[in-house]
Image (tube, rainbow, N blue to C red):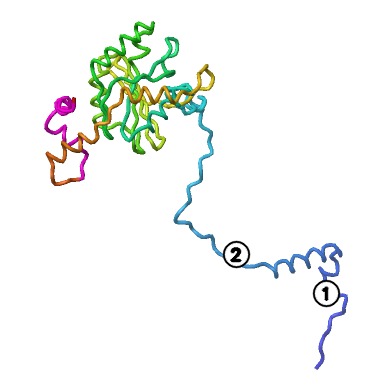
Amino acid sequence: HSASIAPASVRPAKNASAATASPAALIAKTAAVATASMRVAVPPVMTLTWIPKMPNHKPHPLTRRHLRRPRRKRQSQRPVLTFTPTAWAKLLYLRDLGPTEVGGFGITEPDDLLCVRDIGLVQQQCTETFVSFDDLAVAEFFESQVDAGRQPQQVGRIWIHTHPGDSAQPSSVDEETFSRAFGHCDWAIMAILARGGETFAQLHWRHGGGSRISMRVDVRFDVAFAGSDHDAWQEEYAEHVQDCSHHVRRVRKRRFPDDRSVDPLDELLLHESLDHVTERWA
């Protein structure tokens, strides 16, 4: 058999395009093929069923509330009942002289009615739970103070008494006594000093519907004051203070022989007034 073979010049070349392509084109084609072989299949796009809410950063206009300065908490300034060192020393001395309560009137200066400079005692009957002033003695005390040139508000507005226990809180008897004796005054102060050191002071203001204002108690060292006089204070105490504790215990034992542990004054006041009870002691 004879085969006809065309001449080489007539047969088409296998890599005619490759032979005629430039080297730069070959390099670009090779890089494209390599890149296609390295591609990774991309998963289909996921459809979100819940879309988180993005915060709104849109600025809001400033209102008048934002423009105001922050208010400072206003600290309540309580009034202060002060004592000179001499008056305070006298009150401490009188408190510790006996086992009972002891009461008196605070004496002040006309230009400073909240600074006690002396304590005036009047005739009184005392127990561990109450103080009872003699009405005639109170009238004589006020008269003597007026004769000395003092005004009523200097000597008749501050009632001071002591408690033999640790608590200086007023009892119901203290409240009743203060209301009865000072209820007609435009203002008055009840001050209490306990044996344990606790103090209590309250201003009763009658005007404007009436109010009670808690006060602090302090000692002033920036005023002139005299020295202590224990002998004179003890003499004043012995002259005016009468301990009636044994009388109350005797009356209570006669009326309540079962020795119940109760406040003797509360038991007595259930049936009769204090004046009626103390009549037999005179």
Residue 174 seen by the camera: no
- Disc on the earlier residue, 1 or 2: 1
On screen, residue 164 above or below 6:
above
Residue 13's tag is 1
Nearer to me, 188 or 241 = 241
Q: Residue at x 78, y 68 (%)?
A: 30
Query: Quadrant of the rendered structure where residue 159 is?
Result: top left
Relative horizontal placement of residue 250, taking residue 21 as reference (left or right): left
The location of residue 184, given as percent across then percent down, is 25, 14
Total tally of numbered discs in the picture: 2
The location of residue 101, given as percent across then percent down, is 31, 31
The location of residue 95, given as percent across then percent down, is 37, 31
Task: Specify whether residue 81 is painted magenta.
Answer: no
Count neighbours of disc 2 (C-alpha within 10 A) and say few if under 14, some if 14 to 19, many if 20 or more: few
On screen, residue 270 above or below 88:
below
Query: Quadrant of the rendered structure where residue 241 is?
Result: top left
Looking at the rendering, the stretch of residues picked out in magenta corresponds to: 261-281
Relative horizontal placement of residue 274, taking residue 126 as reference (left or right): left
Q: CA distance from mark 1 to mark 2?
A: 40 Å
Q: Amino acid at mark 1?
A: Ala
Q: Which residue is mark 2?
A: 42
Q: Residue at x 74, y 69 (%)?
A: 34
Count neighbours of disc 1 (C-alpha within 10 A) and say few if under 14, some if 14 to 19, many if 20 or more: few
Foreground label between 1 and 2: 2
Nearer to me, 85 or 250 = 250
